[in-house]
Image (spheres, grey):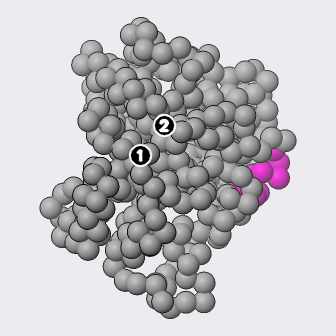
Amino acid sequence: MEKFKLGMSDQMVSQIALGCMGLGGSWNKSEGMTKEDEITAVKAVEAALEQGINFFDHADIYKNGKSESAFSAIWEANLVDRESIYIQSKCGIRLADDLFMGSAPHYDLSYAYIMKSVDGILKRLKTDYLDTLLLHRPDALVEPEEVARAFRDLKEQQKVRYFGVSNHNAAQIALLQSYLSDPLVTNQLELSLVQSQLIDEGLNVNCAVNPGNYRNDGTFEYCRLNQLTIQAWSPLAGGQLATKEGREVYPTLVQTIERYAKEYEVSFEAIMIAWLLRHPAHIQPIVGTKTPSRIKAACEATRISLTKEQWYHLYNSGLGKHLL
């Protein structure tokens, strides 16, 4: 698998990353992690490594922290040295059971919460440092000075090497960046053939073909201009195209994907990933599966390169309408 430079860092990372949200068993906080959960995690990471993946994406909330704990089983299994892989995690979402009685789930990018979160992440992952820390969601009450102080302290303490954001628009990134001394390296956003608004926005300027209430503020173009790597979460649309309901909602798209899967002799998943990889922005898909066979199937995307005509055919099929 080819590698590319992540944002303005000096790190070479795999074209595809493994999303680790599925590791760790149940989302129920009261249910502990089992030995079987650890074995599942080790097998998933092993399958990813065999395909050339060196990038692993986490978040402190995934399975209430159990995803990170399950992943740490790779050290005892001696799968890989820490220095040879890239580990990323996210913080900033506070779930209901993390809050005082009567509060609602919310986002928290305060200095204290970021620092506390990173300590917890490192403990669960059993590592001394993160390669990248992302702010998981924008906080309406964010004070950029506090974020900047947290980033500075975490870097000085050698707990985090690089920083980025997730689900932030262009203006939010620009505001935060104005307080930082180092450039943010990535923005993780939902992007797939059935969730293409980031791309739709740029293709529908002064056009009524696919009108919509766009709120992306030129985010896609901003990231490219400022060399932030765009990471695509849920690149396989959460597996919905594999369900009966999903195939009924997107019949034309399913048929188009199946056509090119047959033509290129690759999996259904590979075509969806190849659509993202074909874009010149060097999008990094975060494939969130714990099943070795599906990891392998998705990585077949690196063997092919869609033509421009095929890329637009898939895009139009996802929209259910054609560009002018």
Q: Which residue is mark 2?
A: 1
Q: Position of residue 283 (x, y in %)?
A: 55, 52
Query: In terms of depth relative to the viewer, which is nearer, 125 or 323?
Result: 323
Q: Is residue 241 left or right of residue 144?
A: left
Q: Is residue 38 left or right of residue 286?
A: left
Against 217, is 157 above or below? above
Q: Secondary structure at mark 2?
A: loop
State which tag comes first along the sequence, 1 or 2: 2
Packing grade of label 2 (10 A; few <14, some 14-19, many >=20) is some
The residue drawn where x is 45% and y is 12% is 75
Q: Residue furthest left?
A: 244
Q: Which residue is mark 1?
A: 303
The residue drawn where x is 35% and y is 56% is 271
The CA span between labels 1 and 2 is 9 Å
The residue drawn where x is 31% and y is 23% is 43
Q: Is residue 83 left or right of residue 291?
A: right
Q: Position of residue 51 (x, y in %)?
A: 40, 32
Query: In terms of depth relative to the viewer, which is nearer, 12 or 213?
Result: 12
Against 291, is 69 above or below? above
Query: In terms of depth relative to the viewer, which is nearer, 244 or 149?
Result: 244
Main secondary structure found in the magenta portion: helix
The amino acid beneath tag 1 is Arg
Is residue 166 one of those drawn in magenta?
Answer: no
Q: Position of residue 249 (x, y in %)?
A: 23, 71
**Magenta stretch in the rendered image:** 173-180
The residue drawn where x is 29% and y is 32% is 292
Is residue 177 one of those drawn in magenta?
Answer: yes
The amino acid beneath tag 2 is Met
